[in-house]
Image (spheres, coloured by chain):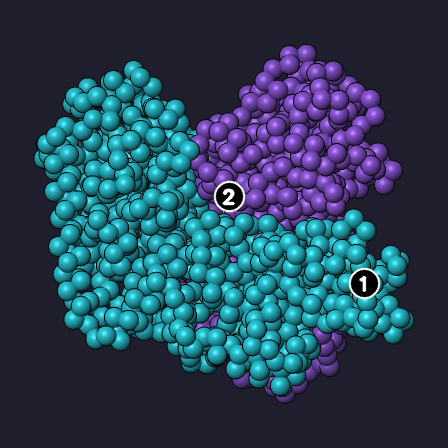
Chain colours: A cyan, B purple
């Protein structure tokens, strides 16, 4: 619609509008409101206001538009629904219950926020069938949805309308739109003209601190217009207006924002329209008053039979879409079916392992000194040929991260058939979009930036780990080895900080061969994100004898044995493995048999059997760890008597070799640390 | 200017425009261009394109408007200049050199990006006189400037126009404006009507990946309009247009965006207007061609005498402002002078220590079970009375973070005399604005959010640590102890991840008394940011005997001695100290003399003398650490034979007591860990 239409701002006549709704609609929406307020009351915590405010919008969306199958919640061509305002989880649980998602029984609703229930405080993907992503941290839902909507278009370009043809709907709050990540997301969505993305903005004018105008005076409609979105503002309690707006949005050639003016806590006699209904139980009196105001006669957790029937009809409405899709799928050529199913399942092509070995053998034979970011590019050139579902990208550092394979073509608003995304200078938006692609299924996203800017995307990385999704971060420029750009660009604490996140692989390969191995393990880690830290500076090829075995797959291994019974063990990662090997040479020349362990992935090493770990770490030897980062986390490998050679401060701006000298990360220092402990 | 004026878009006639500039202007701007390209060439790395593109804008700004004193770069009432696009550091170094900042000799320029020079790859505050903040990570400069401009207005409200009356100018790039944090910053600036903030946007249409339209199609002018800014687009090579735009911006009642259409690498014969001039030396041939194109006759690093004279005149222009200000300052009442100087120096009022002791004594006497977030509120109620430069705020969690002292009043666009800021749901923007206030001097900022959302502001926290600025983060809801909100809201890795950042104090007080002590140490840490992690759940008061000594100031101390010669040492933080003390009781009842160490701040403890640390840690005892977070970082305290009771996965949604049981963080588990090691 034209900006002029955006002026259709709702008035105080909101409740009049809802009086114009059909009684059936109102009762269906009230069922959501009642379940939400009663569940929060029973749990003694939670957020009733948002579900009560957005009940009308959700009712229209799910009864008139959403394509889903309650009996098969993960049907690939379903519409996606993301509750970006995840604190309003009772909205989603109420919908799942009312629409007949089998697992979402009334007992689950009664156990809202209790241990082991399907109704945790914020929605959790996989945990609760019908939930598309884990939300709660604001801004993540709307931004992740961009990746879902993009994946839909990209898979549509590959598999056609018959197999991939769905929408992504989002309910977002003021908080979602205030978060910075939303800017990155809406810019990206506008740029890529993701017309299948429809955001329903719960425009209720209330935040936790009170009225929105305490902290916000921007114009969201104008802002989304500026980003190339279709926009409209409607009365979010007017069912007809909601229906018309969604209907229009579905036909737009742009992503759509529907700003729904709502009253938070709709129906609550004293708390409606106030922060008081946002994040706490309403209390018995207020709940009684709400029942009266809404004309909702039933006891807590009871739904009148006719209302339940109306919802069940809506729940069954979509089943025919599922059947029609299956028929089309059955008619598709066998190879298309197989490829669709393989990529949906996340299985890798058989050719992967042989391709990786071809690459490894090539690196071992060539014996070139090469930056691991360049090695990674060579690996990607190979992988892109055999793993067509691989989707690359970079936050505007393509030539620095070396993330683009030769064969990759750019994804654009005019042509979604490509497989490389120019994310722009939007690290956080990139990581969220990668989560969206991984959640959508059918694609394996990787994206690059400098390691130091992992901080910018950390909230989305954490969510990938929590949601167990395979997103692969290419983090180049991984230490003071980047040189002149100085301390703002030199990661020091980032390896430790990333290793701290549960269920995240952090790789730091020591040469081209380990780089290929890291990529293979990352791709095979189907339920875990991976970060691959890569150098700017050239590194010797250390693994000059080819082996088909992926040695990095155990996280750490002996890369260079000692001459005779080892007295010392040097443990290093990435660019410091060659420093450790130079120290090994010195020490062995002095008659100190020394072995070197390369530890490309602590996280995986920690999961190895104790006997393996002990064999690699050799507690009886003098142990020194070497990494151009902080010591945190290394103590477990070196023990009380061990030593660490690395950083304990921020870096500095200078050519990198001078920095290594300046900060004392040298073969001499490593050898000396051993001598002091012999 | 009205939005209609924004349509004054530049045409391809850019170079014509610059032909209309005075020859003197052009030569002055060319001096910047020459120094930038020659320094980058000599360093063999760096970014010549931006300084060359923005040389005209910078020349007008610094010769016509900027208020500064080259002889006294930290004069309090100077205009602030922030190079948000920090990669263009040679722009700033050239300006400092040409304007006569004494330390910035031509030798420093020749040593661009070399070890120990005043000309590191990206500008670094304190390191280089005249540099207001460390920039490089995109989006930070423009967002930090919001805090500077806000501090200016707040101090103006306190000290009046005579003492505080200056502008904050920013040069920002496309990258700065694509970063999500810029959304938070411009919304905040628009909301607070920071009319002294003027952003000069280097609108060059080029990013590292190539043309901007690879990744961006939004309308920046419309976007800033939507956020309540004054906007205009001009030809960034037209000196008269630049002057008129800045002149207008200075009189606007809104923050101003001046989009300056420029050609990156202006003057370079083949690389002008291309990504090729962005981030690499131009090369000898291109540099020769540029000299010819610009009509710049001098050898590298040589400035014609007349050009040098013109710049020196500009450099001296501002000295009279400094003198006039000093005269006004000398006339101010003594107490005003003293207070201004005290707060500018960052010294604390003498009443602080006695106030803290009053609070501590009160807590010890009351012996109440209270959440440390509530204790923190009580502390703030006291501190706000004696530390008037304290400025509070929260990212829309005021009532949850308990960040607002009773006496504090809100800062609004209409009245800057308050001392509490409603940052909105903008954690990153908040942390950047806090950096800006701390950099500006005169205020001590603290701001709250949930600990898990420390991830959202991490890039700004890192910068605070790198810049050595006193920003204080109030991170409540610091563990699974927050209960029902579940894993998205439960920090697990965050304490470790924050401790990983060099030069950041991470406090986790065990009770109300330690909370007061943490605040005192944080305030006294003038060159270091501090994070204070606080509980949602109630904690017993453990420090029931008052002592004037700040025990937390040593980072860790024995909070409960053993009955007899200790066989075990339990080391804990925050809410787990009372669990450790319950375990101590069990163990001592069994005849195992056990002591408990509270470790409110590892960072400070690590800085204590070895003898003190050994006395506290007692390596001869069985050592168990207890913290409702991950083990990373604890090994150094417990040793090879020690144990850890904590988390090794994400949390879950349930009442908190059940979660502690579920994850095995209990007195029983701690006692058992000791027994297994006796």
Counting the numbered discs, the total is: 2
Q: Position of residue A238 (x, y in %)?
A: 17, 38
Q: Position of residue A75 (x, y in %)?
A: 25, 56
In the picture, which quadrant includes the C terminus of chain A?
bottom right
Depth order, front residue of B468/A114: A114
In the picture, which quadrant includes the N terminus of chain A?
bottom left
Q: Is residue A397 above or below residue A498?
A: below
Instruction: State the residue position of label 1.
Output: A568
Q: Name the residue: 71% across, 19% down.
A: B589
Asked where in the image residue A656 lies, by quadrant, the reply is bottom right
Q: Chain of mark 1?
A: A
Characterize the local packing of mark 1: few (<14), some (14-19) or many (20 or more) Cα atoms within 10 angstroms.
many
Depth order, front residue of A54/B281: A54
Question: Is residue A459 visible to the viewer in this orientation of the structure?
Answer: yes
Q: Position of residue A311 (x, y in %)?
A: 15, 39
Horizontal side of A432 relative to A662 (left or right) equals left
Q: Is residue B653 above or below residue A499?
A: above
For the residues labelled 2 and 1, the Cα–Cα distance comes to 36 Å
């Amino acid at each position: 619609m034209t900006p002029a239409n955006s002026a259709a701002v709702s008035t105080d006549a909101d409740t009049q509008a809802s009086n114009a709704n059909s009684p059936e609609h109102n009762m269906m929406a009230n069922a959501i409101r009642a379940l939400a307020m009663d569940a929060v009351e029973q749990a003694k915590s939670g957020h009733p206001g948002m579900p009560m405010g957005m009940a009308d919008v959700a009712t229209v969306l799910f009864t008139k538009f959403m394509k889903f199958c309650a009996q098969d919640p993960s049907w690939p061509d379903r519409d996606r629904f993301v509750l970006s305002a995840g604190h309003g989880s009772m909205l989603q649980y109420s919908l799942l219950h009312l629409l007949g998602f089998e697992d979402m029984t009334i007992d689950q609703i009664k156990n809202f926020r209790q241990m082991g229930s399907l109704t945790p405080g914020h929605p959790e993907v996989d945990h609760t069938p019908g939930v598309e992503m884990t939300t709660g941290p604001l801004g993540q839902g709307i931004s992740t949805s961009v990746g879902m909507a993009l994946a839909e278009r990209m898979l549509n370009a590959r598999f056609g309308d018959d197999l991939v043809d769905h929408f992504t709907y989002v309910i977002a709050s003021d908080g979602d739109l205030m978060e910075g990540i939303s800017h990155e997301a809406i810019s990206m969505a506008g740029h890529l003209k993701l017309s299948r993305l429809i955001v329903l903005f719960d425009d209720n004018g209330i935040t936790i601190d009170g009225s929105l105008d305490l902290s916000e005076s921007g114009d969201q409609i104008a802002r989304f217009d500026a980003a190339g979105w279709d926009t409209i503002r409607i009365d979010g309690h007017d069912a007809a207006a909601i229906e018309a707006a969604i209907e229009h949005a579905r036909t737009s050639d742009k992503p759509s924002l529907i700003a729904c003016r709502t009253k938070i806590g709709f129906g609550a006699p004293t708390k409606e329209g106030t922060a008081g209904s946002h994040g706490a139980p309403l209390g018995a009196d207020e709940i009684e008053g709400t029942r009266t105001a809404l004309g909702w006669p039933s006891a807590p957790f009871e739904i009148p039979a006719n209302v339940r029937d109306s919802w069940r009809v809506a729940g069954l409405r979509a089943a025919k879409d599922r059947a029609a899709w299956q028929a089309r799928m059955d008619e598709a050529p066998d190879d298309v079916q197989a490829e669709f199913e393989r990529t949906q399942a996340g299985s890798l092509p058989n050719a992967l392992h042989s391709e990786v070995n071809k690459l490894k053998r090539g690196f071992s034979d060539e014996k070139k000194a090469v930056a691991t970011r360049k090695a990674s590019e060579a690996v990607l050139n190979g992988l892109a040929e055999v793993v067509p579902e691989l989707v690359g990208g970079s936050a505007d550092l393509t030539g620095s991260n070396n993330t683009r394979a030769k064969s990759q073509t750019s994804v654009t608003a005019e042509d979604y058939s490509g497989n490389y995304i120019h994310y722009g200078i939007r690290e956080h938006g990139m990581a969220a979009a990668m989560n969206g692609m991984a959640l959508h299924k059918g694609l394996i996203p990787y994206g690059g930036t400098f390691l130091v800017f992992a901080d910018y995307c950390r909230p989305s990385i954490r969510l990938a780990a929590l949601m167990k999704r395979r997103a692969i971060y290419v983090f180049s420029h991984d230490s003071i080895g980047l040189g002149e750009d100085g301390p703002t660009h030199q990661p020091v604490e980032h390896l430790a900080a990333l290793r701290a996140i549960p269920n995240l692989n952090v790789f730091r390969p020591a040469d081209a061969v380990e780089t290929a191995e890291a990529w293979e393990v990352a791709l095979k880690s189907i339920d875990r994100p991976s970060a691959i830290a890569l150098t700017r500076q050239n590194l010797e090829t250390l693994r000059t004898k080819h082996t088909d075995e992926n040695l990095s797959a155990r996280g750490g291994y002996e890369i260079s044995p000692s001459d005779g019974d080892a007295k010392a063990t040097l443990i290093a990662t990435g660019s410091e493995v060659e420093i450790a090997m130079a120290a090994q040479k010195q020490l062995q020349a002095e008659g100190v048999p020394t072995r070197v362990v390369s530890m490309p992935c602590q996280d995986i090493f920690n999961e190895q059997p104790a006997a393996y770990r002990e064999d690699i770490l050799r507690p009886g030897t003098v142990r020194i760890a070497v990494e151009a980062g902080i010591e945190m986390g290394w103590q477990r490998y070196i023990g009380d008597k061990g030593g660490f050679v690395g950083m304990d401060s921020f870096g500095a701006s200078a050519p990198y070799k001078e920095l290594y000298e300046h900060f004392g990360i040298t073969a001499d220092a490593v050898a000396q640390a051993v001598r002091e402990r012999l």
